[in-house]
Structure formats: C-alpha cells, structure tokens
Image (cartoon, rainbow, N blue to C red):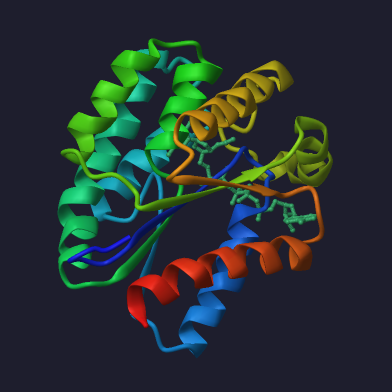
Amino acid sequence: MVLNRGLFITFEGIDGSGKTRQLELLTADLKKADLKFLLLREPGGTSISEQIRRILLDRKNTEMSAETELLLFAAARAQLVKQIVEPALAEKTIVISDRFYDSTTAYQGYGREMNVDFIQYLNDFATQGLQPDLTFYFDISVKTALDRLKDRTEKSDRIDLESQIFMEKTRAGYLRIAEQNPDRVRVIDAERTPEEVYKDLKLQFEQVISLEFV
Ligand code: Z5A
C-alpha cells in the first residue's frame, strides 16, 4: 500500500464487540511510539456531528423513521470527512475512526433491511468517495455481545435497545461486507480475552504501519 497522504483506518463491529477497548490499547501504543494520529468516533467528531449524534442516540426519539436515521448518519459523516478527516489525511496523519460507513451498510442496510445499493451510493456521496485504507472488523456472536452488555441497560442508547434479531442481521451484514472487501477488511476473532484480541490486532497493525511509515 503506497499512499501520498496519511492512513485511514476504521474499527467496526456490533455493540459489545470490544472495539472501543481495543482502540484504547492501540492508541496507548501509538502514543508511546510517538506516531502522529487522530482518533475519531462516529457519529461525532465535529460540533455539528456531535449534535446529530445526540439526536440519533436519544432514547426519547422513538418516533424516528429509518429514512431519517439513515440520512442523519450520512449527514454526520459528511461533516466529519470534510471538516476533519480529509485535512488530517492531507497532513499525513494516521486517522483512526471508531465506526465509519460500514456501520451504515451493516446496521441500516442489513439490520433494518433498507436498500443496500442505495446506501452504498449515499455512503459514497457523504464521503465524496473517501474509503478507509484498512478496516478491522471485530467479529463476535450476538450471544457473547449480549452477555457483555447485560449490565449496561441503564446506559443503553436508542439503537442499543434494538432486538436480538436486528443484531443477528447486522452481524451477518458485517460478514458479507468483509467477504466482499477482502483486501480492505480484516476480520478479527473478538470472542477471546482483550489481551489475545489485541495481540492479533497489534501484529496486523504493525505490518501495515511498517510498510507505510518506517
Ligand atoms: N450506528 C449505526 O446504526 N449506523 C451508523 O452509520 C453508525 C453507527 C456510525 C453508536 O453507538 C451506535 O450507532 C451503535 C451503532 C450505531 N449502536 N449500537 N448498537 P456508540 O458509539 O455509543 O457505541 P458503539 O460504537 O456501539 O460501541 P461501544 O458502546 O463503545 O461498545 P464496543 O466498542 O462494542 O465495546 P467496548 O465498549 O469495548 O466493550 C463492551 C463491554 O465488553 C465493556 O464492558 C468491556 O469491558 C467488555 N469487553 C470488551 N472486550 C472484551 C473481551 N475481549 N472480553 C470480555 N469483555 C470485553
């Protein structure tokens, strides 16, 4: 992989897959290695995108239609890409995002059964064609995810309250995305302990970084 800009890496997985924990471990190592990186989350990362995030995740917004939800995720992403991601990549920063457009394809496309071709068109429009260079997908069964999340009922957001069937469809969507994008998407078995998962992630990450940055 030879790039004349920074590297864009995304983390994906169903809720409870442990990707946020893995991001904490990775960013601690990146700090130690003194690498220039930027950590983002979706939806969010700019003032406008964080305002949209609050609307999207508010448990009171039970009347939100699937179409509104889809367009709000796309709007939050469009702002993030233009305002933060593109300029950071132009400065050769490693940009890491906790979720990106695969979340929309998996959750809204496969989970909510909306038109996946249209969603891919919308993803492309919102990002002006920007694609991640590499995506780590943390794969976990819905049963394990639910076990991990069972103490979190109080903190659950609007999308966390979705059914187990929705989670199964979303996971199947992620596996389909990985199958269709073998060069970009690395599937990581996230059923293991955080330390075991991280060992795997770190190894794969270092291979890419050494090609790009050393
Ligand atoms: N969404 C969407 O529908 N469409 C879109 O386009 C986008 C997003 C961009 C964002 O919520 C929601 O929006 C999300 C998808 C949807 N909803 N759902 N469901 P968020 O940003 O608030 O949350 P999240 O991205 O889903 O992630 P999270 O809450 O940070 O969870 P996580 O990253 O999957 O896992 P974690 O926080 O690292 O770990 C979960 C728990 O498991 C925690 O108690 C850990 O201590 C524990 N854990 C972690 N790893 C392990 C291992 N290996 N073993 C055992 N226990 C573990």
Of residues 111 and 173, the one nearer the viewer is 173
- The residue that appears at 53% across and 30% down in the rendered structure is 179
From the top left corner, tell me how far across and down residue 104 is, in percent: 42, 30
Left/right placement of residue 142 relative to residue 33 reads: right
Of residues 209 and 165, the one nearer the viewer is 209
- The residue that appears at 59% across and 41% down in the rendered structure is 13
Q: Quadrant of the N terminus?
A: bottom left
Instruction: Name above or below for residue 196 compared with residue 128.
Output: below
Q: In the rendered image, which quarter is residue 146 located in? A: top right
Q: Quadrant of the C terminus?
A: bottom left
Of residues 52 and 171, the one nearer the viewer is 171
From the top left corner, tell me how far across and down residue 19 is, in percent: 61, 54
- The residue that appears at 69% across and 20% down in the rendered structure is 163
Left/right placement of residue 36 relative to residue 103 reads: left
Q: In the rendered image, which quarter is residue 174 located in? A: top right
From the top left corner, tell me how far across and down residue 35 is, in percent: 39, 83
- The residue that appears at 53% across and 35% down in the rendered structure is 178
Instruction: Name above or below for residue 189 compared with residue 203.
Output: above
Of residues 95 and 155, the one nearer the viewer is 95
